[in-house]
Amino acid sequence: MAHDSQPPVVLVVDDDMAARLMTRIALEEGGFDVLEAEDGIPALDIFRSQKIDVVLLDVMMVELDGFATCAAIRQMPHGQHTPIMMMTGLDDTASINSAYDAGATDFVTKPINYGVLTHRVRYMLRSARNADELRRSESRLEKAQAMAKLGHFNWAIDTGEFECSSEIERLTGVASGTTISTIAPLLACVHPDDRGAVDTQFGNAIAGGESLQLGCRVLLAQGGTAHVHLEATCSTVPETGARVVSGVAQDVTERRRLEGLAHKLAYFDTVTGLPNRTTLRKDLGQALARAVGSDSVVAVFSLDLDNFKRINDTLGRDNGDSLLKTVAERLQACLRRRDGAFGVKANVRAGDFVARTGGDEFYVVLTQFRSAEESAVVARRMLEAIAQPVNLGGEDLVLSATAGISVYPVDGTTADQLIDRADAAKNHAKAEGRGRYQFYTSAINARAFERLSMENNLRKALQQEQFELYYQPKVDIRTGRFTGAEALVRWRHPDLGLVSPANFIPIAEETGLIVPLGEWIISAACRDIAAWRSQGLPDVRVAVNISPVQFAAAELPLLLSKALLAAKLPVEVLEVELTESLLMTDTEQSIAVLAELRALGIDVWIDDFGTGYSSLSYLRRFPIAGVKVDQTFVREMDTNANDAAIVAAVIALARSLNLAVVAEGVESELHLRALANLQCDYAQGYFYSPPLPAAAFARWVTEHRGPLARAI
Ligand code: C2E
Ligand code: CA
Ligand code: CA
């Protein structure tokens, strides 16, 4: 094609030299560059080596005539679209036809009217350029469509002419230019299941002159199935009244695949392929909607593998994952077993499913139960299935799981309610010991709620120092003199007032909050003792209660010495009370700690003695100062012979072991008399004083410097 800066080049091929000359003059005057050839052969040589924009070709030549030359040019790669004008004899119809057959663009008849020749050449050149531009934009469109897997087609219904792009040819197997009198050849490629719908929609569109949009599956000639989206309109050409269906079709197979993948990632767990939490909630919601009005029951199981974190940490992530897959398979097998006997392959009932919501948390939803009891059978089966050994890397591993069950409609009516309650039941089961299942009860919920709000409140209480220490004096029964005190913690809650330690210590222990709370108690006791000292009070020995949880978690000797050091106090001012249950577990370790405390000079007392199961001889092994007889025995001493006997025995045995005895809960003169008779060493209780705030306790000590009350 000519560049705009250079004149177009015309190759004139004619064996008549005079005609060539005339033509050259006319063309050069019209602004063209002209090359000449006197026959077909040299013309082809020139065409091959030079850039030619237009060819003027005489028909009659000696060696290679115009038709052959024209055909040869069309064979050349750059000669396909070059405009070629044939010069024929006047009214030589046969030649004209042959010229077009050979690929000529146009013809002029001889003798040539040189005045119009340049115009005709220019016109031919211009339309060649337009055609070229069109071809290029068509090829761009074709490429773009190929990339988008988009194809277009036009079907003239009345004549049957069908034109389409290559993408449509690929999808339908119908070639562009084919004549189609009915839709049948196009329908042939459509998946049999979709064929009816496509046929109907096409029929409606044609009959009603409307547009259509549809998706269907297409069976490809090269094999495989493509998902195709089709849009078409049926219109009438105004001039001719001809009806045309034109449209586009797009192969959306890949897009569908990616959408499917995205869907999978959003709604399914990647490790096991099971529904994730989103899908669990949605599908459970649907199951509940179906159950409304029927008398069937829906059960939600919340399952945790016991100790999974430890297994995962020791075996590595890959083994952990394969373990989770095994569990998933076993749970699904339990769903199938619902309807089949052992070993019989049965389908999973519609609506039943297993989900994994992360970590080792699984949920199982079972529908169409007649009663809640039925679900207990399934729960047992699931726990048994999980408890079967798993072979991992040649080693047999035994897992166990804990499950909680909630049941629609009794335990809740929404998916979230049922999931939460199955969780609460599971947590309750865990606290009772793992490897079991538990149905939800409203008591569990109340307890869980109370615990949760208590836990949050306790945290806040620690930050805001809502705790106080009360002190209860201990008295030497023989001398009637005050010898020390027990520190008892109180929680002054802004709304609830004074909360009893019996209500919050167990929760502080369960949540671990007892550790920081215990530290606070120790240093608060030291602060109070130091304050009393500075007020000129005689040194008060204070016993602090140490929870087993704190005993296990903290280095007690270190903690105590630090607190004493910080308050600049001698060690003798502190004592410790421990429960006997603490000594029963991990005995060797306990003995080591007790020995350290004794070496420091801190006395240890065994609290609530008599309520546990340790024998006194067992106590021989522990380096302790003495025992505190539990107040429940002391209080009932005068009315209950059994309790009196226990107290008597404890005191006698303690004496034989050289241990001192404190009687708690001394409320009356009668108690005191009895204890004195039994030669009990110390007494503590309301008879002398209830636990008192620090300032009130200091006053009490000043007022009771002398003997308080002497027995007998
Ligand atoms: P405990 O160690 O056996 O404490 C003695 C309990 O008996 C105290 O209850 C005390 O107020 C009560 N008491 C004292 N004299 C009498 C009496 O004559 N009659 C009757 N009926 N009761 C009497 P409190 O203060 O409610 O403490 C209950 C339990 O809470 C304690 O039992 C102890 O196990 C725990 N506790 C209290 N303070 C602390 C603490 O600072 N740390 C730890 N770890 N536990 C504490
Ligand atoms: Ca105590
Ligand atoms: Ca006690």
Image: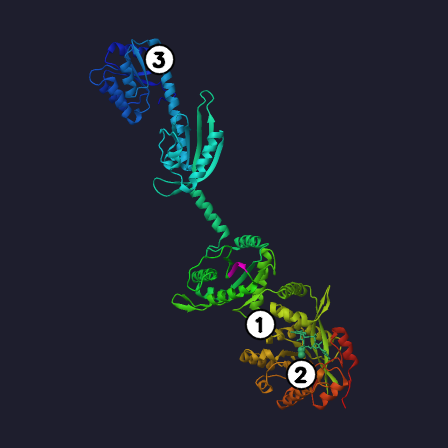
The answer, for residue 683, to whether it is visible in the render is: no
Distance between the Cα atoms at labels 3 and 1? 107 Å
**Residue that carries the numbered disc 1 in the rendered image:** 553
Numbered tag placed on residue 629 in the rendering: 2
Q: Is mark 3 within 8 Å of ligand 1?
A: no
**Residue that carries the numbered disc 3 in the rendered image:** 118
First in sequence: mark 3 or mark 2?
Answer: 3
Secondary structure of the residue carrying numbered label 1: helix
First in sequence: mark 3 or mark 1?
Answer: 3
Res 589 → quadrant: bottom right
Provide residue 654's location: percent of width, then percent of height. 64, 88
Q: Amino acid at mark 1?
A: Ala
Estimate how packed mark 1 is, as few (under 14), some (14 to 19) or many (20 or more) residues with alpha carbons within 10 Å: few
Q: Which residues are magenta?
A: 361-369
Q: Amino acid at mark 2?
A: Val
The answer, for residue 22, to whether it is visible in the render is: yes
Distance between the Cα atoms at labels 1 and 2? 26 Å
429 w.r.t. 680: above or below: above
Task: Tell me what residue is drawn at x 48 percent, y 48 percent.
Answer: 262
Estimate how packed mark 2 is, as few (under 14), some (14 to 19) or many (20 or more) residues with alpha carbons within 10 Å: many
Res 705 → quadrant: bottom right
* Closer to viewer: mark 3 or mark 1: 3
Provide residue 526's location: percent of width, then percent of height. 68, 74
Res 425 → quadrant: bottom right
Residue 406 lies in the magenta-colored region: no
